Amino acid sequence: MRRATPHDLCLGIETSCDETSLALVSDGKLLAHVLASQSDLHALFGGVVPELASREHYRYIGRLFDELLERASVSPKDIAAVAVSRGPGLLGSLLVGVAFAKALALGLSIPLVGVNHLHAHLLAAGLEQEISYPALGLLISGGHTNIYRISSPSSFRALGRTLDDALGEAFDKIGNLLGMSYPSGRLVDEAARLGNASVSFPLPYVRNTNLDFSFSGLKTAVATYIEKNCSGLSVQKPVTDVRLLPGEILDLCASFTHTVAETLAVKLQRAFRQENDIRFCLLAGGVAANTTIRGRIRALAAENGAGIAMPSPALCTDNAAMVAYAGWLLRQEGLFHPLDMETIPRGRAIPDDYERDPIFSGDTMSKASCLCR
């Protein structure tokens, strides 16, 4: 077990949706990580129930904090900064984590860093490999499909976004139509690996010049195909083992996934041409664990002579390791938030309202300042 560097230990807190997670990062390396998943609870309802999610966060967060400190063999006084997902996400869930973080910041007299959950996803790969800037960032998750120009850990410029369904939502909706258990995106990926992309679907929203995405048309096309060609197939629901699925459904999943990967490649290639000084790419978000997409984007980066970094599958989903790491990076720039920092739910833009520590020296994370004014 590696030891924490004095004045360098950053605590990360993640409660944006249905995962309660805390982590400690020291010297840019993950020291310890704990997580409580609510997936079994929400599976009973076929999706996340916001009120239940926030109650579960409240129930778990204190005991997880104690467990984290025990695993890392540190005490609260060793923590030099606390980073927390401030948004986007479910407001009730976010408030639990933000309130806990603010209490720790006030009680321990340490800086508070509100982290953009989406930016943290894209920076997560830095825990495992070196990131080169400037970079293109492709974020594909349950709620977002975005492309960014990333100039530094604190400088993100949005180039494109989803106009309707995010990619993760599309995967889950197709999986649900096929009778797969929630969350079904992982099962669609597993089925795709066993099938052949023999069904031709048009690439959605690519006959334009922008970098935005729209997957509603593809979702409708696949749903129509299922109704016409797969409704009579015998499938025992809910599907938990894709090896038992008929070949037609395996081929459908492979075809859908192939179409998605090619659509992402078209837009990302367009971004490389638009931002012609970039030679590095980041892929992140829950859907970035998809094997077909990872392979296609890796190949695209190679075609452009660009390096690529993507988190291991365990770091693609919501986790506090990415929040702690993002917070640690921001503290290296002396950035923090006062204790009246606002929590931002999904649907609202997250402001770039960091303040800079006036006594920041550039080589340590000061514990003496950053209290609410």
Image (cartoon, rainbow, N blue to C red):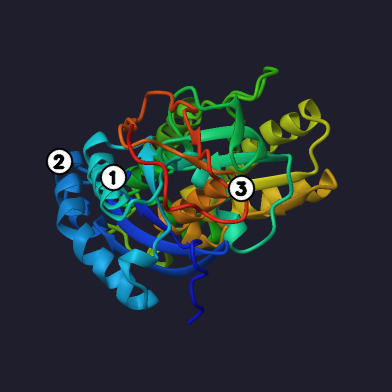
At 54% across and 50% down in the image, what residue appears?
288
Question: Residue 216 placed where, x, y %?
Answer: 45, 27
Question: Residue 100 placed where, x, y %?
Answer: 25, 49
Q: Which residue is mark 2?
A: 51
At 24% across and 40% down in the image, what residue appears?
95
Look at the numbered disc 1 and give the secondary structure of its residue.
Answer: helix
Q: Which residue is mark 3?
A: 283
Query: Does 206 appear above or below 96?
Result: above
Question: Residue 31 placed where, x, y %?
Answer: 47, 70
| Mark 1: amino acid | Lys
Q: Nearer the viewer, mark 3 or mark 1?
A: 1
Look at the numbered disc 3 and give the secondary structure of its residue.
Answer: strand
Q: Residues within 10 Å of mark 1 (few under 14, many from 20)?
A: many
| Mark 2: amino acid | Glu
Q: Report if the CB atoms under discs 3 and 2 are less than 8 Å apart.
A: no
Residue 102 marker: 1
Query: Does 65 appear above or below 260?
Result: below
Look at the numbered disc 2 and give the secondary structure of its residue.
Answer: helix
Does the rendering let one see residue 252?
Answer: no
51 vs 32, nearest the viewer: 32
At 52% across and 26% down in the image, what residue appears?
214
Residue 358 marker: none
Lower position in the chain sequence, tag 3 or tag 2 = 2
Does the rendering let one see residue 225?
Answer: yes
Q: Nearer the viewer, mark 1 or mark 2?
A: 1
Which corner quadrant holds the C terminus? top left
Query: Between marks 3 and 1, how big is the CA–CA gap?
Result: 31 Å
| Mark 3: amino acid | Leu
